Image (cartoon, rainbow, N blue to C red):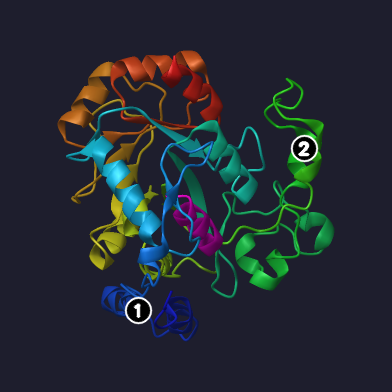
Amino acid sequence: MARVGSARLHIARHWRSRHWAGPLAWRHAAGHARGAVVCNCAARCRPRQYRHHRQPVADCANCVCAAGRARSAYNAAAANCGVTRVLNIAHRGARSLAPENTLAAARMARHAGADMWELDVAVSADGALFVMHDDSLQRTTNAAQRFPDRAPWTFSGFTLAELEQLDYGSWFSESDPFGEAAAGNITPAAMAAFRGEPLLTLRAALHFTRRHAWQVNVEIKRLPAPLENFPVAAAVVAMVDELGMAEQVVVSSFVFENLRAVHALNPAIRLAALTGLVETEPQLPDLPLFGVNPHYVGLTDGAVRGLRARKVAVLPWTVNAEDEMQRLIDAGVSGIITDFPQRLQRLLGS
């Protein structure tokens, strides 16, 4: 494995020095990484089958040959930005079975049979990309105990070194937020093991996805102050390019400017437009979209047909009740984003 340049450092320096020059600079920064990962072990990579995974993955954990297998498997199920079977997409990982946006949740999602997992990108005060949904660290970490004088514990005010000191799993062990432990679906030993779950960086999340020839939906949100102008889309593209993972990544956002920035930098990365309730035909960006991710409430059969007619995958969020899952499957959605990939897998397998 040979790498060229350091895209993250290049981007962070541009931003911190306030000399960021817009899309042309984004393209220049990402260019340092594009095509930078070279497989040195093609002759030695032989596929093997994992018990909980339907596609073979490479023995070599660092080899981008896994991306090729993921690409061919996924493209077989996707044509004209539509899909021929319903995709099981684990929201923040299998967050009903493990702490959200952690490697534990990603593992649970794979074991549950998910085709893809979804995560949220956050940025530390010193420009590091990591995985977190809320602006505040309070709900899913022990930041309030570890840094009691830093309320409201907005992640953008913490450095990567400080974020790495936090516990991202004990809150789940203590609260059983979805009642799955009480229902006997998570063992006491597994719940105890979540205590001390570490920070998940975006790089580690992408490495995990690549190693298992899997797929990931990376959601880019608006960043809180003082990072509102941080070029997060460019930073995400640079990392995806560095790892040679364009074929394994979907980028979604409510902020269509983020999608435009991603497309300008690397048109090979699939895009999904996040929307709210779909009561009429949604306003979508003038981009070659892979998918539209609408809220499931009020998503009618007619709305699904209208979106599919536009040659986009329809991937509603966040659907947890089995009767709603079945209704949407019958309506013809392309996939379902859910906190309960294990439930959806039972329906899809029945």
| Label 2 sits on residue | 191
Q: Residue at x 80, y 63 (%)?
A: 147
Q: Residues within 10 Å of mark 2 (few under 14, many from 20)?
A: some
Residue 303 placement (x, y as % from top left)? 25, 24
**Of the pair 329 and 112, the residue shown nearer to us:** 112
**Of the pair 316 and 340, the residue shown nearer to us:** 340
Q: Residue at x 28, y 46 (%)?
A: 72
Please tell me which of labels 2 and 1 falls first in the chain: 1
Amino acid at pointer 1: Ala
Residue 103 placement (x, y as % from top left)? 61, 50
Residue 189 placement (x, y as % from top left)? 80, 36
Q: Residue at x 66, y 58 (%)?
A: 199
Residue 186 placement (x, y as % from top left)? 72, 29
| Label 1 sits on residue | 29
Task: Classify 158 as above or below 269.
Answer: below
Question: What kind of secondary structure does the magenta stretch mostly adopt?
Answer: helix
State left or right for residue 88 relative to residue 27: right
Q: Mark 2: which secondary structure? A: helix
